[in-house]
Image: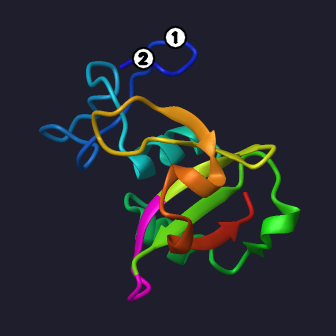
Amino acid sequence: MTSSYGTSLRGLTGNGSSGGRCPASSTIGFDCSSLVQYAYRPQTQLPRTAAAQYEATAHRPVSRGELLPGERLFWAHRNGSIYHVGLCAGSGRVLHAPRTGCTVEVAPLDSAMPAADYRGATRA
């Protein structure tokens, strides 16, 4: 996988393990939550899924007007279930993996995912 900047990205997909071993050195690509996990390693161990990452960090909410680069951004379905996470890239942009197998990208916050689904952010 190549980022928008032409850099090869290696990371975790699926459940992050293969036969009890971490395949990070041989797996190419990220899904949204593994990208965020990877960005915070090794200082912070985050749960595997976007929903679990939100639950683990929801006690540190950040308003949209106070976002800083590196903070976690979340999107949810109408029923409230979190389905996507990305990282604030500053200037109204998000660094995210839109779907497993897609290129990691920096995109405008309002168009990275459906704007109506934006749930909020949590502090790093």
Q: Mark 1: which amino acid?
A: Gly
Give the vertical position of 96 relative to 28 (above or below).
Answer: below
Which residue does the image show at 41% across and 84% down from the upper left? 78
Q: Residue furthest right?
A: 66
Quarter of the C terminus within the rendering:
bottom right
* Residue at numbered disc 1: 6
* Res. 45 in view: no
* Mark 2 and mark 1: Cα distance apart in space: 5 Å
Instruction: Confirm whether the magenta stretch covers residue 15.
Output: no
Q: Position of residue 108 (x, y in %)?
A: 64, 45
Q: Position of residue 39 (x, y in %)?
A: 58, 39
Which residue does the image show at 44% across and 41% down from the upper left? 97
Q: How is the image coloured?
A: rainbow
Which residue does the image show at 34% across and 36% down from the upper left? 12
Q: Which mark is residue 2?
A: 2
Q: Position of residue 70 (x, y in %)?
A: 72, 47
Q: SS for tag 2?
A: loop
Give the vertical position of 37 relative to 101 (above or below).
Answer: below
Instruction: Confirm whether the magenta stretch covers residue 83.
Output: yes
Q: Nearer the viewer, residue 114 or 83?
A: 114
Q: Residue furthest left?
A: 19
Give the vertical position of 3 relative to 87 (above or below).
Answer: above
Look at the image and give the residue range highlighted in magenta: 78-84
Mark 2 neighbour class, 10 Å CA radius: few under 14, some 14 to 19, many 20 or more: some
Direction from residue 116 to residue 100 in the image, left or right: left
Q: Residue furthest bottom?
A: 79
Residue contact at pointers 2 and 1, CB within 8 angstroms: yes
Quarter of the N terminus within the rendering:
top left
Q: Nearer the viewer, residue 12 or 71?
A: 71
Quarter of the view holding residue 50: bottom left
